[in-house]
Amino acid sequence: MSRDAPRPIGDTLLKVEDVSLGFGGVRALSGVSFDIRKGEIRAIIGPNGAGKSSMLNCINGFYQPSEGRITYKGKARGAMRPHEAARDGIARTFQNIALFRGMSTLDNIMTGRMLKMNRGFFWQCLHWGPAQSEEIEHREAVERVIDFLEIQAIRKVPVGRLPYGLQKRVELGRALAAEPELLLLDEPMAGMNLEEKEDMCRFILDVNEQFGTTIALIEHDMGVVMDISDRVVVLEYGRKIADGDPEAVKADPKVIDAYLGTGHG
Amino acid sequence: MIYRESGQFKTSYATDQAIFPILQDRIALAILLLVAFVGAPMFASDYFLTTILIPFLVFSVAALGLNILTGYCGQLSLGTGGFMACGAFAAYKIATAFPDLNIVFVFLLAGGAAALVGVVFGLPSLRIKGFYLAVATLAAQFFLIWLFTKVPWFVNYSPSGVISAPPRAVFGFFVTGIEATSHAKYIFCLAFVALLALVAKNLVRGRVGRAWMAIRDMDIAAEIIGIRPLHTKLLAFAVSSFYCGVAGALWAFIYTSSVEALAFDINRSFQILFMIIIGGLGSILGSFMGAAFIVMLPILLNAGPTALGTPLSTSTIAHLELMTFGSLIIFFLVVEPHGLARLWQIGKEKLRLWPFPH
Amino acid sequence: MDAIFDFLFGPLKEIWAYPTFFVEVVVGGLLTGVMYSLVALGFVLIFKASGVFNFAQGAMVLSAALSFVGFTELGVPQWLAMLLTLAMMVALAFVIERVVLRPLVNQAPIILFMATIGVTFFIDGFFQMLWGEDVKRLDIGIPKDPIEIHGVLVNTFDIVAAVVAGSLVATLAFFFQSTRIGRALRAVADDHQAAQSVGIPLQTIWVIVWSVAGIVALVAGIMWGSKLGVQFSLALVALKALPVLILGGFTSIPGAIIGGLIIGVGEKVAEVFWAEKIGGGIEDWFAYILALFFLMFRPQGLFGERIIERV
């Protein structure tokens, strides 16, 4: 799988400077800096426990970094809650699927539109007039996401009953429905078979190309990472050990050490 | 072969999102409403109206309220009785302070008062979850009942601590007080309940309901996609308490006509909780089914052995009732957590395919 | 404004003027608090070992006391009645494990909580049907005379209760920390799937812990029963133990003790010095409001483990 056409990669969208994060005595991240440019696919890789998920959690406000600064769209952010990050156009998926299990696929993806719906409580009570037209307008947007991800058949199925691979796809759908500027994907292909992985890769590349969405993803499958990402950050024990385009990172002796453990043997 | 949807095509998202997308369901609902509004008052006896249908309607409103909070938003509350008491006493204070105010507005305002109190007691839900919150709602239960028992202002300084519904009329018919006929009370109650049920259904199938369910299913993920947890939970507390408050007002004014705070003690809260567990958590229909079941059960327990020729003593029946409720709760939680409503749905799905097994 | 000031701070003057009386109230509160802790202990045990918030603990206290009195009224000697009641509590543990816990394993905690509310109603109905619902007197020969220590009046019964509660806690702590079963219990509490995978029999552990909770319920039932008489209201004592748990944290045995003491003292002092001006009877809710305020600042309770949220 290779990138057919060069896409416009813009200016820096998000900048992480010197970010550290600690839980009690454990340091999950120490002094990590990197940036994400508009329109690119940025991978964050590293061995287990390297602090990758913690990094994403800092970016979308679930954790507050104990030190350092995160600048998003040119503005340095103070402490912020996740829903504020969502309002700013950051959406994400989770390592362990975090769907709303009691709701149907359709309703799950509709929740992704939540921030764009604003009809008042009164109209909601009536479910008529403006509230209904708003509901239909967003239903149409959601149906486009459903078509894009090819999950028309499971529209009305409660997500708890879906197989793992489809749940991952619905979760991507929920994030896409929010039309994010920055999409964070936490191991989107973990536990998938080859075919499912290929599908998922295709969706990620299509999202990036068709909607111009900036994507930051964590993934363990090196083949996939090297194929689809523009630039790669490598973390180990909470520190950044390499950063650059896939070829350079692949050749970096520190990365080889971290993955093969030769340096420690 | 009658229950078929073949040939009914949904050509717009609006029809797909209707409450009853299937034609036969709409016909059934029309018949049900006709029976409820016309048939029941024509043929039902006074006894049937006052001891079964009216309490069923009042309980349904309370069950709707609790189901919104617990079934849809996932916040378990054991304070339902307290919020009902709020509605009852607020309605009494408003009705006696403004004798000219239409009783409909009295009830709505009473619901509003209960909603405010609900929001106050919902505030801890920001920090605490699950059974911690359930225990916290007990604070509301005990505090509110104590307040209405101890502060004479709430009962207009009546020495007995009992409030009696003043007579009020709607369209020239008395619906509360001594002169009100059970038929007028029933119709009034029914109209109220039908509207409240419609509003509840509208809320849960739209944006608000999805936010509630998202918080219920996974609050962290809900926050990350942009739902404000406190805001959403407080809205659920407000709406839920509004329904419970209206239920309390209906109870005091229409069902019993006079009431003391202890009628809304913790056992009332459990009773409503049982209705939604048995009827179905997260289901509007289930709220009604649960209410019907719990209203009917003691009557059946009473009538069954008597009909068999072995009448039981009152205390034995009371104990049997406790045991039956307990076992049913466990049964439904283990076997069918979505309650009677889910069983009904399964039945309908079977009927759709009948007589073909698949 | 003056009225509010007077209401809030007036009683402080009273306290200052009569310190002995205040000490008496505090001691009375402490001793009632011990009794609350006794009930709360049962909750903590079950929560620690099975992650279930057992609302039925109060009903278990009632059923244990009812059975004990019921057997003695049939002419059974007290030691045998005690053994028979113990056997009933173990049998109850077996039934609950089989009918409720096993089918509901891996369900959300809130579902299990609701299931135990069902258990509460069943037990309340069943044991009252079995033994009747009249108030029964329970006397196991603990003296109830007040004695004077350094000018402070204390009831002998309360002191005995405190000693019993103390030794029960010590025994349980030993059981949890130092025995094989105790280790297995703690393993199950941490992660029951992991515990099962190293060969700890989950179902046996549950039966054991529910039986132990039954024993604690029996002790609490006998103590409360001899204080208040054995009747339905005994089950409501459990409602008093809930704020104790919030205060102390659901997983901590010392927390249950300290929480019980705080609630006991707070409630008594508030009732004696403040409540009469607002109509009295605030014992029903004061503990809850106290616990609620506390929760706003420390959601995991005094001794509870800090909750770290993950995604």
Image (tube, grey):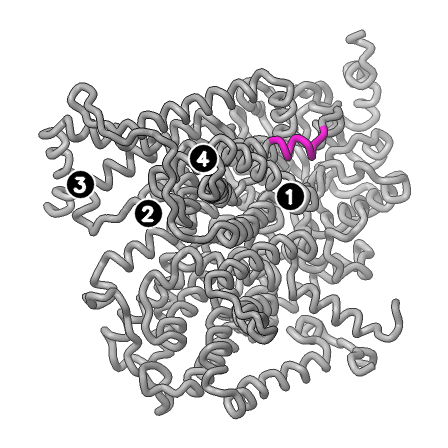
Q: Which chain is disc 3 placed on?
A: C
Q: Earlier in the sequence, mark 1 or mark 4?
A: 4
Numbered disc 2: secondary structure: helix
Along the line of sight, the residue nearer the viewer: C240 or A68 = C240
Q: Identify residue for label 1.
A: C95
Labels 3, 2: one chain: yes
Name the disc covering residue C8, or none: 3
**Mark toward the start of the polypeptide (4 vs 2):** 4
Find the distance from the CA under tag 1 to the CA under tag 4: 22 Å
Question: Foreground: B209 or A109?
Answer: B209
Instruction: Please say whether residue A130 is visible from this viewpoint.
Output: no
* In the rendered image, residues at marks 3 and 4 fall on the same chain: yes
- Which numbered disc covers residue C46? none
Q: Nearer the viewer, mark 3 or mark 1?
A: 1
Please tell me if label 2 and label 1 are on a single chain.
yes
Given this view, does label 2 or label 1 mark the residue nearer the observer? 1
Q: Amino acid at mark 1?
A: Val
Residue C284 tag number = 2
Instruction: Pick whichever of labels 3 and 4 is earlier in the sequence.
Output: 3
Q: Are marks 1 and 4 on the same chain?
A: yes
The amino acid beneath tag 2 is: Asp
Query: Does the CB distance between marks 4 and 2 fall below 8 Å?
Result: no
The quadrant of the image that shows the N terminus of chain B is bottom right
Evaluate if marks 3 and 1 touch, with contact meaning CB atoms under 8 Å apart: no
Q: Amino acid at mark 4?
A: Ala
Spatial CA distance of label 3 from label 1 is 51 Å
Q: Which residue is mark 4?
A: C40
